[in-house]
Image: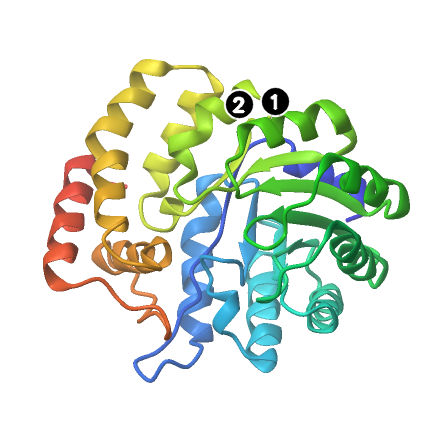
Amino acid sequence: MNPQELKSIMSHGLLSFPLTDFDAQGDFNAKSYAARLEWLAPYGASALFAAGGTGEFFSLTGDEYTRIIKTAVDTCKGKVPIIAGAGGPTRFAIQCAQEAERAGAHGILLLPHYLTEAGQEGLIAHVEQVCKSVKFGVIVYNRNVCRLTPESLAILAERCPNLIGFKDGIGDIELMSSIYMHMGDRFAYLGGLPTAEVYAAAYKALGTPVYSSAVFNFIPKTAMDFYHAVAKEDMATQHRLLRDFFMPYLKIRNKGHGYAVSIVKAGAKLVGHDAGPVRAPLTDLKPDEMDELAALIRKLGPQ
């Protein structure tokens, strides 16, 4: 798949980040992970991001990363495209990108670099070096310490033909609008705030109709129903699901730092697709929080 073909895929549909399965000892569980992907693949996501943020990229070793991407590619071949997460220090991000390309992934989502702040010149150098290390498509994730401006993205677009996507995880509407107005159709644009459904209608109005859904990991039917409601501008369905599920869900998610991932693993466990515990420094939901989440999921009916 060439970069422009990946851009086309990124320009429509619902995307999702599968959880990474760990066993009781906290080690990668390839068998369980493959079963998860086989379960999710038929629900209709346009692409799946292996070893992304919800997949706990930040807690993986290099050896695990290779196994995860290869398992995802092999399991989903001919079913759904796989985009690999890559990030951290520039040279490590390059290693991840090149390993993902060797494993047969269709592109990467470039997650923020690690810890240190950087100016625009440094961010441009970081993204450019990763892009030029591979031939397949790259999607850059504006989040946390990576906050590229429209001007910086224009420079990168000129230097890096395989930079085909922009994902926003900041939620600065003025910045997002400015980027879209400045760059037009040069990029495929993705909404990437945690629990993106809450922001989906607003981002669609900005020209960003595509987003990634974490709850697809445990309520895939509802996630697809919500996406179709956004696409059709069916506000009645959106408001019903926001009121009955997503807003109460946010109240649970906001009880703990890092719960944006932990609550998704909790949901998967509750619906019979246990991905194991989260890794430190994340913590799992408490029993009473699990009960609250279970009640919300029951109200949605069969998935």
Quadrant in the picture for residue 215 = top left
Quadrant in the picture for residue 278 = bottom left
What residue occupies the far bottom of the structure in this picture? 25
Residue 99 lies left or right of residue 233; in this view the side is: right
**Which corner quadrant holds the C terminus?**
top left
Residue 262 place in picture, x, y as percent: 32, 60
**Circles 2 and 1 in contact, beta carbons < 8 Å:** yes
Q: What colour-coding does the image apply?
A: rainbow
Looking at the image, residue 82 lies above or below residue 230 = below
Instruction: Return the residue nearer the eye: 54 or 13.
Output: 54
**Residue visible at 35% across and 78% down in the picture:** 23
Instruction: Return the residue nearer the eye: 247 or 241.
Output: 247
Q: Which residue is mark 2?
A: 204
Q: Residues within 10 Å of mark 1 (few under 14, many from 20)?
A: some
Q: CA distance from mark 2 to mark 1?
A: 5 Å
Residue 90 lies left or right of residue 13; in this view the side is: right
Residue 193 place in picture, x, y as percent: 47, 42
Residue 27 place in picture, x, y as percent: 41, 81
Amino acid type, mark 1: Gly
Residue 253 lies left or right of residue 48; in this view the side is: left
- Element type at mark 2: helix
Looking at the image, residue 214 lies above or below residue 71 = above
Which label was assigned to residue 96?
none
Looking at the image, residue 37 lies above or below residue 213 = below
**Residue visible at 41% across and 47% down in the picture:** 214
Q: Which residue is mark 1?
A: 207
Amino acid type, mark 2: Lys
**Residue visible at 38% across and 51% down in the picture:** 217
